[in-house]
Image: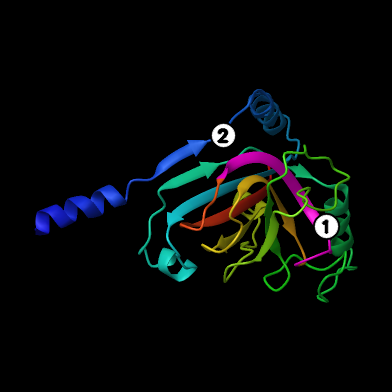
Amino acid sequence: MAIEAASIAETARITRVVELTNPKWEEQRRVLDDAKRLDVAVWVGRATVDKYEGDITPEQIAQGLAVPYETVIGTPQLLTYGGASNLWECLIGNGTATGSQALTYFNNSNAYLGVGDSTTGALNTQTDLQAASNKLRKAMDATYPSHTDGTTSGAASIVFKSTFGTSDANYAWNEWAVFNASSGGRMLNRKQEALGTKSSAASWVLTVTLSLS
């Protein structure tokens, strides 16, 4: 019985990894390589969705008590004009810790990751997810957003993470974005891509990594 149980446990720990791609992303890969060679800074943001069976908490995941059955890695997203403006305004000291404002900081108290079912393409003038009703913003997991200050390449990235439980966002995940409020506020970026269809039998963890490279 011990051997059988061990075999089942090993099988349960197998994660299917799917990396999305498209002709545009293949072209972007070449542009990114050229940008690095020419010392040009490029904004890159990608989403990863870890999919778990049942209702899983961030604490259980951190303790290694849950393993995703599938991980989907997305393609780069679009920085919105409003998102860029927020970054520049905060850079020159005009940001605020007050919630639900255009220039609210994207910190643990105010940052949200949103998902919706719209297949409308991303535009840099957009201010919200494009879904009519199937859309939800979830607050950050503890300690996120995560960034380590420094002067090396690792300091050029920031990571946002939110956990969507079994009762959250049970529809097709066709779009995602980063926000600084639970409603209204400012949308930093948006991406339209098919990440899968979530059901009430699963918990999905959305991680967004933004970097300048």
Magenta residues, as a range?
Answer: 182-196
Secondary structure that dominates the magenta span: strand
Using residue 51 as the reference point, say whether residue 164 is left or right of it. Answer: right
- Which is more foreground, mark 2 or mark 1? 2
Residue 34 or residue 51, whichever sits in front:
51
Task: Work out whether mark 2 precedes mark 1 in sequence or the reverse, and give the earlier one.
Answer: 2
Which residue occupies 83% across, 59% down?
A: 186
Q: Report which quarter residue 113 is drawn in.
A: bottom right
Q: Indicate whether residue 194 is drawn in magenta.
A: yes
Q: Report which quarter residue 150 is drawn in.
A: bottom right
Would you name the residue on which mark 2 appears?
Answer: 20
Using residue 197 as the reference point, say whether residue 103 is left or right of it. Answer: right
Would you name the residue on which mark 1 appears?
Answer: 87
Kind of residue sitting beneath label 1: Leu
Q: Which mark is residue 147?
A: none
Using residue 110 as the reference point, say whether residue 93 is left or right of it. Answer: right
- Eyeballing the image, is 62 above or below 73? below
Specify the quadrant that holds the N terminus: bottom left
Specify the quadrant that holds the C terminus: top right
Which residue occupies 24% across, 50% down?
A: 10
State the image coordinates of residue 122 (x, y, percent, origin top left): 78, 40
Residue 192 or residue 111, whichever sits in front:
192
Dot 1 falls on a residue whose secondary structure is helix
Which residue occupies 36% across, 63% down?
A: 64
